[in-house]
């Protein structure tokens, strides 16, 4: 496999050469399943596990490889297998808090240049959910593009476009229909050889259909959405990286029913920049945008320049982020305490 086709460049080469030992090679994670990894290398695709040292040093999921990661490995090419010893620094990563009560980061995709935020133009179009995706995308370091699918199934396209563009704030918005060949040529202009694009969105929005179209063959099974609520069923079950015919790289991901923030302060600022610009003109620096005199944000709402729902969404995400930071601080203290207990116990055994 030609490494330049999968994103290998001078920056990756430099990072690799600083760490790699004799008889080690570089590869890129194309699929992860239960801590086993398919890795693209010069020897083709190898099935790999992480070394004991790498696993021991991983404090959380963030310390394990994710799809899109560049890794250093010791190959066993005769067996088409290998052992991953190092993860190279990530230039970008789309992360969320893991589902459930654990305070832990889940990296959905790494080393991505662009993210297609895929939303369906059916009844399941949710602007507040889209705001979350935009926030996490800005935080990731990748560039967002909003892709609105199933344009052939909506009768009020212009109104839905207006609502989406009101929260997009300069992000490209592309309306497509694979069935009627609408907008697909425009979408392809964002796919460049050696560049990585991730598809993100809820179940049933058309990611698998879009993946199949871009691949030129039936890569993913396609399922119908439910008639009762216009929501979809999971078709893609694993995050997977595929090489497109023009040598662009695509990372397809399962639908995410739960999308919680992770270290998203900058992402919120970028996603709600119009609110933060208004807030800078408030009379009081600590204005909560409730009933304070001289609140520029509330004035904008009264004059129809800003929707109340948009402000409430902004406040909700800030509260969620503050709660997450408190949980992270508590977990960090707990982890540090466990670490010192372990160190003390080992010292006493000597």
Image (cartoon, helix red, strand yellow):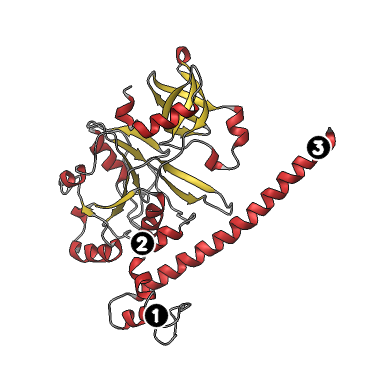
Q: Which of the image's four quarters has the C terminus?
A: top right
Quarter of the view holding residue 252: top left
- Per the rendering, the mark at residue 154 is none
Q: Do labels 1 and 3 touch, CB within 8 Å?
A: no
Q: Which of marks 2 and 3 precedes in the sequence?
A: 2
Q: Do callouts 3 and 2 mark residues in contact (Cβ within 8 Å)? A: no
Q: Secondary structure at mark 3?
A: helix
Structural distance between the alpha carbons of marks 2 and 1? 20 Å
Label 2: few (<14), some (14–19) or many (≥20) C-alpha neighbours in 10 Å: many
Q: Is 347 left or right of 171, judged from the image as shown?
A: right
Left or right of residue 161: residue 127 = right
Camera-near label (3 vs 2) is 3
Residue marked by disc 2: 271
Is residue 309 left or right of 327 when viewed as pictured? left
Mark 1 crowdedness (10 Å alpha carbons): few <14, some 14-19, many ≥20: many
Residue 92 point in image, percent of width and height: 40, 44
Please indicate whether residue 177 sits to the left or right of residue 344 in the image: left
Residue 38 seen in this snapshot: no
Cα separation, mark 1 vs mark 3, equals 57 Å
The residue singled out by tag 1 in the image is 282
Residue that appears at 34% across and 52% down: 226
Image quarter (top left, top right, bottom left or bottom right) of the N terminus? top left
Q: Nearer the viewer, mark 2 or mark 1?
A: 1
* Secondary structure beneath label 2: helix
In the picture as drawn, the residue positioned furthest to the top comes out as 78
Which residue matches tag 3? Answer: 347
| Upstream in sequence: badge 2 or badge 1 | 2
How far apart in space, not on screen, are marks 3 and 2 (Cα)?
A: 49 Å
């Amino acid at each position: 496999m030609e490494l330049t086709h999968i994103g290998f460049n001078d920056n990756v080469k430099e990072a690799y050469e600083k760490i790699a030992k004799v008889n080690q090679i570089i590869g890129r994670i194309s699929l992860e399943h239960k801590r086993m990894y398919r890795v693209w290398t010069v020897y083709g695709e190898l099935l790999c596990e992480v070394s004991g040292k790498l696993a021991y040093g991983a404090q959380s999921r963030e310390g394990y490889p994710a799809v899109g990661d560049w890794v250093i490995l010791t190959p066993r090419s005769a067996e088409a297998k290998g052992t991953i010893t190092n993860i190279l620094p990530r230039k970008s990563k789309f992360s969320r808090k893991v589902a459930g009560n654990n305070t832990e980061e889940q990296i959905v995709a790494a080393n991505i240049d662009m993210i297609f935020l895929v939303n369906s133009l059916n009844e399941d179009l949710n602007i507040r959910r889209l705001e979350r995706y935009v926030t996490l995308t800005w935080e990731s370091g990748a560039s967002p593009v909003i892709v609105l699918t199933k344009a052939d199934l909506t009768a009020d396209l212009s109104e839905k476009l207006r609502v989406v563009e009101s929260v997009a704030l300069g992000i490209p918005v592309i309306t497509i229909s694979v069935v009627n060949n609408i907008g697909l040529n425009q979408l392809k202009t964002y796919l460049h050889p050696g560049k990585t694009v991730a598809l993100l969105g809820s179940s049933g929005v058309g990611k698998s259909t879009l993946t199949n179209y871009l691949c030129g063959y039936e890569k993913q099974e396609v399922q119908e959405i439910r008639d009762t609520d216009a929501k979809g069923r999971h078709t893609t079950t694993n995050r997977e990286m595929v090489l497109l015919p023009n040598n662009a790289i695509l990372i397809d991901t399962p639908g995410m029913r739960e999308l919680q923030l992770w270290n998203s302060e900058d992402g919120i600022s970028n996603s709600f920049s119009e609110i933060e610009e208004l807030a800078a003109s408030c009379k009081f620096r600590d204005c909560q945008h409730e009933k304070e005199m001289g609140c520029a944000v509330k004035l904008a709402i009264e004059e129809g320049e800003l929707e109340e729902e948009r402000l409430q969404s902004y406040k909700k995400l800030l509260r969620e982020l503050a709660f997450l930071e408190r949980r992270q601080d508590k977990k960090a203290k707990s982890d540090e305490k466990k670490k010192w207990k372990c160190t003390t116990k080992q010292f006493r055994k000597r």
